[in-house]
Amino acid sequence: MHVVQLLRLRSFGLFSVLLTAGLLCAVGCKGSGGPDGSIAVTGSVSSEGSAVTTGTVHFVGKDSGASGSAAIGAEGQFEVHLKPGTYQVTVIAKDGVDTMDEDGNPVVAKSLVPEKYASIETSDLEVQISDSNNTVALDLSP
């Protein structure tokens, strides 16, 4: 094949991918809700009055078993899609990653939030999500 023919095929392939992605979004992305009945939930995470600027927020449905997770942004903000319901919440935020020292011993990164929020068994965070209540402020006190 000539270079011009290869470029045309490559351009057509890229156009096809972009067109397909656009059509899928147009069909499946209605407003803030997802195709499965989920809604966009936004929120913030703070601990002792300061924004938590890294980590992950996990939501586990109390009755439905539904779940969702979101990364915490630099301003302490997050966004996740959840179905309406009651959720238990955990937050994991560390100042680095767990590693090993030169002797092979584990070195655990320091938690930036009280440890009780890292486990579903010990976290007392619970939120109710609905169409009219889709903003969450998580204040993690010791």
Image (cartoon, rainbow, N blue to C red):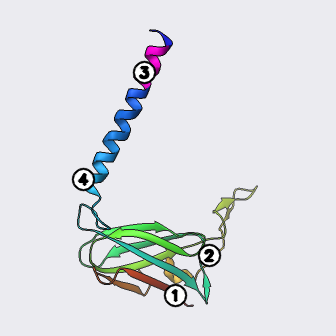
Q: Which mark is residue 8?
A: 3
Residue drawn 35% across the image and 68% down it: 81
Q: Position of residue 49 (x, y in %)?
A: 61, 89
Q: Tell me the tag on residue 27.
A: 4
**What residue is shown with label 1?**
139
> Is 6 part of what is drawn in magenta?
yes
Query: Alpha-carbon distance for marks 1 and 3?
Result: 55 Å
What amino acid type should be assigned to the residue bearing mark 4?
A: Val
Mark nearest the camera among 3 and 4 is: 3
Q: Is residue 49 depicted above or below 60 in this figure? A: below
Q: Earlier in the sequence, mark 1 or mark 4?
A: 4
Instruction: Tell me the kind of residue under disc 2.
Output: Ser
Q: Earlier in the sequence, mark 1 or mark 2?
A: 2
Q: Is residue 70 magenta?
A: no
* Magenta span of residues: 4-10
Q: Residues within 10 Å of mark 3 (few under 14, many from 20)?
A: few
Q: Can you see residue 119?
A: no
**Residues packed near mark 1 inside 10 Å, few (<14), some (14 to 19) or many (20 plus):** some
Q: Quarter of the image containing the C terminus?
A: bottom right
The residue to which callout 2 is attached is 111
